Image (cartoon, rainbow, N blue to C red):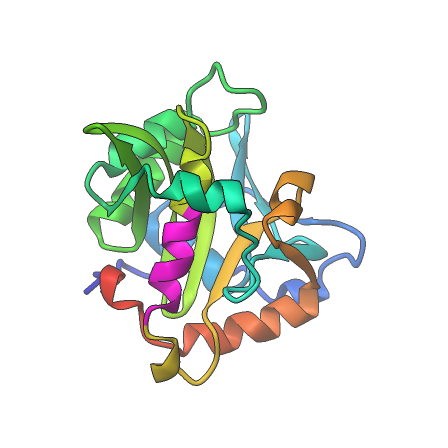
Amino acid sequence: MPVEPPRSFWDFGDPRHAGADDDLVGVGADLEPGTLLSAYRHGLFPMPEEEDVLWFSPVRRGVLPLDGLRVSRSLRRSVRDFEIRVDTCFDEVVAACADPARTGGWIDDNIGAAYRRLHELGWAHSVEAWADGELVGGLYGVAIGGLFAGESMFHRARDASKAALVGLVELLSADADAVPTPRLLDVQWQTDHLASLGVVELERAVYLDRLAAALRLPLPAVFA
């Protein structure tokens, strides 16, 4: 079971009271485990900017309904080529997502170290795609109750990151009959690529209501 860290000194408040047109809802605080968990429980997530931390709660939040993942015929064939593993090389997945050669890379050393601490406490997890004994894709994120907050993904082989996402959806859905409401897979923002996989947008208030319900659900067995 995850280990609850000391509580944060910071109070994030309710993002419903933030600007109706602004995804950015806070600046500052720290990246201690208790602070990160409090942020996720309030519907926020961090991104770095120089010496500061920016906290976002998107006005329109990207989520992937577990019954809405679009798996094309070609992707269904590709998935068979990968072995999906969980938490066998978390640090390597974070390092691959943080590769500065990637376009739009944003994960700095402080962010990477913060999520490694969360992983050590049992809150952050990696879902990995392997082929021929090599890590070729994956993703990582934070699991709290019925929430999985996806942070980043990467691939070194075609469809490898998509295969990891398919694996994650299967893990979150494995005991769907035993939970009263579906778990929540948060991807922060919808992009054209994610929309093609079934990601939809929720208004901030709707997301926060869904979040409150998800946090009351048990962890999926694979992350417990």
Which quadrant of the figure has residue 64? bottom right
Q: Which residue is drawn at 37% across and 26% down?
A: 96
Does residue 43 show up? Answer: yes
**Furthest residue toward right:** 21
At x 62%, y 67%, the residue is: 207
- Nearer-the-camera pick, 213 or 23: 213
Q: Position of residue 9 (x, y in %)?
A: 41, 56
Residue 169 belongs to magenta span: yes
Q: In this view, does 47 lie above or below 146?
A: above
**What residue span does the magenta drawing correspond to?**
165-174
Residue 215 location, quadrant: bottom left
Residue that sits furthest to the top in the current view: 101
Is residue 199 on the magenta stretch? no
Q: Eyeballing the image, is 185 above or below 219?
A: above
Instruction: Where is residue 146? Give x, y as percent.
Output: 40, 69
- For the question of whether residue 25 can be seen, the reply is no
Q: Position of residue 87 (x, y in %)?
A: 23, 45
